[in-house]
Amino acid sequence: MVVDVLVGGAVAVAVSWLALLVGLLIVRPEGPLLAEALRILPDLVRLLRRLAGDATLPRGVRVRLGLLLAYLVIPVDLIPDVIPVLGYADDAIIVVAVLRSVVRRTGVGAVRRHWPGTEDGFVALCRLTGVRYAGSDRRAGDAGPG
């Protein structure tokens, strides 16, 4: 009886893990966008922290961002970070998926106000989230909206 419960629990965990991996594959950025996500990941983490602390954003968005930050801090990942490239790819894919939903809910202006990186990095972020940004054709030295 105890063995059946343990085996059932192990199977449930394995199936859940596989379902999450399939979900990551579905929402992952296409082609070179994943490499861009990994390149701007440090700026993305700073952006998430700034957005989560912005009291003008809807509570649901801030909760979502807080949960994402907690996921990034917790050392347990869907794919362990010790696996080269793939270990960080799951983090990048999850960040992009949450940012897509944040941009849909708050608009690109809120994200632009808090972006800590370069203009080129913000353009890459817009490509990752599938957002058209009016300033995306500006050069990195231009002031941009804000």
Image: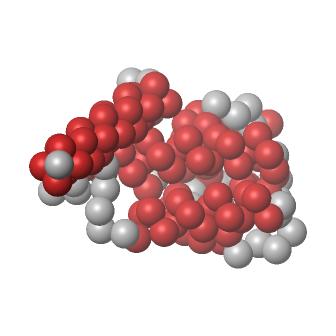
**Viewer-proximal residue among 130 and 87:** 87
Quadrant in which the C terminus appears: bottom right
In percent of width and height, residue 87 lies at: 24, 49
| Left or right for 113, reference 73 | right
Q: Is residue 23 above or below residue 46?
A: above
- Quadrant of the image occupied by residue 4: top left
In percent of width and height, residue 126 lies at: 63, 39
The structure residue drawn at horizontal position 55% and vertical position 36%, both measured from the top left corner, is: 128
The structure residue drawn at horizontal position 17% and vertical position 54%, both measured from the top left corner, is: 2
| Left or right for 81, reference 91 | left
| Left or right for 139, reference 58 | left
Visible in this render: residue 21?
no
The structure residue drawn at horizontal position 30% and vertical position 35%, both measured from the top left corner, is: 15
In percent of width and height, residue 127 lies at: 59, 34
Colour theme: secondary structure
**Viewer-proximal residue among 42 and 143:** 42
In percent of width and height, residue 56 lies at: 86, 69
Q: Is residue 69 above or below residue 78?
A: below
Count of labels in the image: 0
Visible in this render: residue 73?
yes
**Viewer-proximal residue among 125 and 135:** 125
Check the image and name the residue furthest to the right. 56
The structure residue drawn at horizontal position 80% and vertical position 46%, both measured from the top left corner, is: 105
| Left or right for 56, reference 120 | right
